Structure formats: structure tokens, C-alpha cells
Amino acid sequence: MGSLTDSPLTFKPLHPTFGAECHGVDFSSPLPPSTISSIKAGMAKYGVLVFRATQLDDAGHVAFASQLGELDDSTPFIQPGQKYRLHPFTQLTDVGNIEADGHVVPTTSLRHQMGLGNGLFHVDCAYNPRRAGLSLLRAHQLPPKGTGGGTAFADTRTAYEDLDETTKAQIDEYVLCHSLWQSRRLGAPDCDFLKQMNPEDHFMARHRLVQTHEPSGRTNLYIAWHAHHIDGWGREESQPVIERLLEHASQEKYTFQVDWENNGDLVIWDNTCVMHRACGGSFAGRYVRDMRRATVHDSSSTAWGLNEKTDNRAGMFGAGMPKPTQG
């Protein structure tokens, strides 16, 4: 990994403990190894990097992301006969609010309800056997300014370091069981479809709560609202502990918000040392917010947690999901 002291890039901090805007990257062609090393060093220090007006298209987005590691792929989530909106770039996840016919997703739809859990602090893919490392989110088309749609981040390394020593000792060996359905149910408690999705009936991924963030060597609190229970504990006795830690890590002093300014803005974050959440806004159901994400698999020694190395991923077509109904 490169050093920031001799980097050709400049980093403007966005918060006292993490996050920075990165300047000096020319995205018009594949980046040289020295630039990739500088970006990785910046990620290790800051956890979140913001690149403004990159002018990346889908092909460039995928090419750049692949320089940072092995990419996830959306193919397992595409139903037979479904036309993927971002075809042929299945390495990109469609996290916009656009229907296949081009219309904005209505707020009464199941798809909108399923996405409300993204408004809770989380890390991408904690509910999968192999968790996500880096997420690269790009604004393809933004809603009008003043209608919201920002993304907030939380510094879970500093949040861990600020815990008292008694709490650190108590939680050191905890393993959390993560479920996508847990956060979706919390995000939309009145959705009939999600009411029938009991997380305990579906696969949960097991990842240690306290981990070393290998790129920086700092200890991290790997937590999210996906967390259903502590391994070996019941849900009721786990809930107060999980909620207390989440409330601690999402205090204002550990968080900041990125406001998307231009089409082509790109934000990279490291899911193994920060949480994030969608901030919502009045654009929902009214204006297009076309966001596209590439996900780099975690390659650290704890990437697979305490899980079997399988492709049993939450939300995958045919993976035990009931047929969606409007709720």
C-alpha cells in the first residue's frame, strides 16, 4: 500500500476523524498503479473518499472498481426473463429509484418499502457469508438540489476506541448474526410482505463484532442494523446490547453527511470500518435519483467471518424468498 506523504493526490478532510475529498485523479483512462496505491492509502486512513464530477460512465466505473479488487456481481439476483436496467454491466448494482419502464418508483410500492431499511446505519453485505469490502457509489442522475438524497457515514473505528474498557472487555468475543430481513423489517414495520419475513427462517451471516481493520491496524466495531442477535443469545436479550452499541456509534460526533452535487460524483467507503445510511428526502416518488454501485469483495482474513464459503446470499432469486406482494 502506498503512502500519503509522497502521494500526487490531495485529500481534504471532511470530519475530524474520518472522511476526505480526494483531488488530482484523472478518470479518463485506467489509473496507474501509483494512483491506485495512493487511493488505497487514503481509504485506509479516511474510510470514506469523495471524488467530484468524475465523468465516469458505467464501463469506466466497472474498470476503476476492478482495479481495487474482486467485484461482486448482480447476476444471481436477476430473475429469469428480467431485463436488467444496467445491462450488460452486471457488476453494478442498481440502487436508483427507477422502474424498468423509466418511471420513478412510487412510495407505495413494495420496492420502495424494501429500500427503507437503507435509511438505517448499516454496512453492505454483512448478511452474506463473504462481506463487502469497498463500495463505490456513483451519481448517474441526481434529483433537483434541495430535495435531499444525501448519504451519511459513521466512524466505527473511533467509536470503538472511545468505549470504556469494561465494555470493550465484555464485547470482545461477541459474534453478531446479520440478516437483510432484519433491517428491512425495521425500516418498514407496516409493510405486510416484510411482516411475513421472519429473519429466523432465513440464512444469517455470522461476523465478529470486534475486529482488526487490517489496512489501518486499528480496531473496529463491525456492527449494523442488520444485526439480529448475538450468537448464542436470544433476540430479546441481544436487542438492548446491539441497540446501545449502534446508538453509541451513530452519535453526531462520529458522523457526517455527503451531499451529492454533480452527476458523476463518486463516493468510496470501506464497509469494514464505517457504516452508512441513505438520508432520504422529498425527491422520493417524484424525481429520478439514479445511483449505481460497484462492490469490491472484502479480501481480508476475516472476509468470510464464521461462515461457510458458499454463495448463499440474501435476496438471491430462488433463495427461499416468497413471491412478493404489494404491502
Image: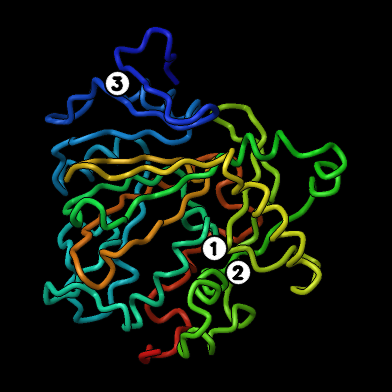
Q: Is residue 173 left or right of residue 226?
A: right
Q: Are marks 2 and 1 in contact (CB under 8 Å)?
A: yes
Q: Position of residue 87 (x, y in %)?
A: 15, 62
Q: Quadrant of the C terminus?
A: bottom left
Q: Quadrant of residue 177?
A: bottom right
The residues bearing labels 2 and 3 have C-alpha atoms spaced at a distance of 37 Å
> Could you say which is closer to the camera, residue 121 or residue 174?
121
Which residue reaches farthest right? 166
Q: Position of residue 213 (x, y in %)?
A: 60, 35
Instruction: Where is residue 307? Give x, y as percent.
Output: 62, 59
Nearer-N-terminus badge (2/3): 3
Residue at the front extreme? 146
Secondary structure beneath dot 3 equals helix
- Which amino acid, by three-letter code, is at mark 2? Met
In this view of the protein, which residue sits in the foreground, 71 or 3? 3
The answer to whether 183 is drawn above or below residue 110 in the figure is: above
Q: Quadrant of residue 63?
A: top left
The answer to whether residue 253 is left or right of residue 150 is right
Instruction: Assign the N terminus to one quadrant of the image.
Output: top left
Mark identifier at residue 100: none
The residue where tag 3 is placed is 35
- Dot placed on the residue nearer the N-terminal end, 2 or 1: 1
Between disc 3 and disc 1, whose residue precedes? 3
Give the percent coordinates (x, y) of residue 120. 51, 61
- Residue at which label 1 appears: 127
Q: CA distance from mark 2 to mark 1?
A: 6 Å
For the residue marked with disc 3, what is the amino acid?
Answer: Thr
Q: Amino acid at mark 1?
A: Tyr
Residue occupying image coordinates x 35% and y 35% = 68
Q: Which residue is mark 2?
A: 204
